[in-house]
Image: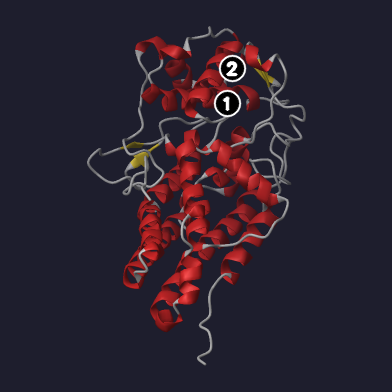
Amino acid sequence: MQLKELSRERGFLPSDDPLTKLNSYFGLWEGMAKELPKLLVSDRLRTVLDQMPVLDADRLDQDQCERAMLLLSFLGHGYVWCDSPPADHVPPGIAIPWFRVAQRVGRPPVLSYASYALSNWKRVAPDEPVALGNIALLQNFLGGKDEEWFVLVHVDIEAKAGPAIAASVDAQDSVQRQDVSALIRHLSVIVESLAHMNQTLSRMPEHCDPYIYYNRVRPFIHGWKDNPALPDGLVYQGVEELQGLPQTFRGETGAQSSIIPSMDAVLGVAHEEDPMRPYLLEMRQYMPPDHSAFIETLEQGPSIREFVLQEQCDFRKLGDVYNACLKELGAFRSKHLEYAAAYIRKQSQLDTSNPTEVGTGGTPFIPYLKKHLEETLEGQILPQPTK
């Protein structure tokens, strides 16, 4: 199995640093996005975007499409959520190119994790690593330390996951070759990588306050599917293919990151059928296509879990490192659950544009997080009694 377009060093982050600017033809988008925080604060955003002309998205090179998707997604979500009640449409100047670019990148025309985090960073010192302290966002809604830090923690986690993603491929190859020593080595890499991810995740409270997150960051990343504020969805004005009919898409959510589904796949973590399973599979439609394809490849690959169960003669080393992977994965889910309670559930609901009963993806999140944590820890393997 190959990593295909993914990076062994950066995992699901782009192999090259994200593009920071489109060519001059798209200067209007760049200018609007740069002024987005000011336009939001001055309540002028909808007025300005209503007058924005339709630019020809076909003039984008393929390597410019992710940058365009980022700009249009931020402008579109800013337009919808900048006031209460939210807008039930986006104007043609946003809607038409947003729809076209979305088709080219293989994701729906809505702000997804790929635009919000994976392609939304730059290195402060270009010769230093992609890590907290050396990365900054390319685009914000309102801006400020809390919004910046919230997203950058995710970027750092993605970078820290790189070795685990690469080791997942190597580990399955080791099972294919029946190479226990190599499998132990690669699983050890996954343990270390997950531990580094957990260290980064634990830093979220350093600069992201729950109140600020809930009231200034979270409202802009909601979608328009299963959202009580937009029960009928959103109309993309001027998009002929949609015939003026409202569309429903999920909002940005960490469930659109490919890391945890990949870890579940390679470690054989089983999640019983429940109402959340179709939602998680749906989230793959919001991932870059090569990322969702990678998860599917891992799911179809040789089972590491079954191999560990069969290799009882060397269980002390192999079983211990496999269980260590599950413990670190469980620790990540436990911390995520803790943050969901602190940053969302405990915050007072101020209006229907920021509902607490569902996550930004539009589904109940607490039961899902608890269930998956339990299933991860229950997957640890005990050595079989010696006959």
Q: Mark 1–mark 2 contact, CB under 8 Å?
A: yes
Where is residue 28 drawn, in percent x and y?
45, 12
Residue 53 seen anywhere in this rendered image of the structure: yes
Q: In the drawing, does residue 120 fall left or right of residue 141? A: left
**Dot 2 amino acid type:** Ala
Please name whichever residue, 106 or 111, is drawn nearer the observer in this view of the structure: 106
- Total labels: the figure holds 2
Instruction: Determine whether the residue tagged by mark 1 lies in a helix, strand or loop.
Output: loop
* Residue at image coords 71%, 14%: 244
Q: Looking at the image, is 307 positioned above or below residue 230?
A: below
Q: In the drawing, does residue 151 fall left or right of residue 213? A: left
Where is residue 75 drawn, in percent x and y?
54, 22
Which of the numbered marks, if any, corresponds to residue 256? none
| Residue with the mark numbered 1 | 109
Quarter of the image for residue 283 reads top right
**Dot 1 amino acid type:** Pro
Please name whichever residue, 55 or 219, is drawn nearer the observer in this view of the structure: 55
Crowdedness near tag 2: few (<14), some (14–19) or many (≥20) residues, C-alpha within 10 Å: many
Where is residue 83 drawn, in percent x and y?
67, 25
Instruction: Determine whether the residue tagged by mark 2 lies in a helix, strand or loop.
Output: helix
Please name whichever residue, 319 or 194, is drawn nearer the observer in this view of the structure: 319
Q: Looking at the image, is 71 positioned above or below residue 339?
A: above
Please name whichever residue, 359 or 348, is drawn nearer the observer in this view of the structure: 359
Residue 205 seen anywhere in this rendered image of the structure: no
Crowdedness near tag 1: few (<14), some (14–19) or many (≥20) residues, C-alpha within 10 Å: many
Where is residue 117 drawn, in percent x and y?
46, 39
Q: In the drawing, does residue 6 fall left or right of residue 372? A: left
| Residue with the mark numbered 2 | 95
Coloration of the structure image: secondary structure
Q: CA distance from mark 1 to mark 2?
A: 8 Å
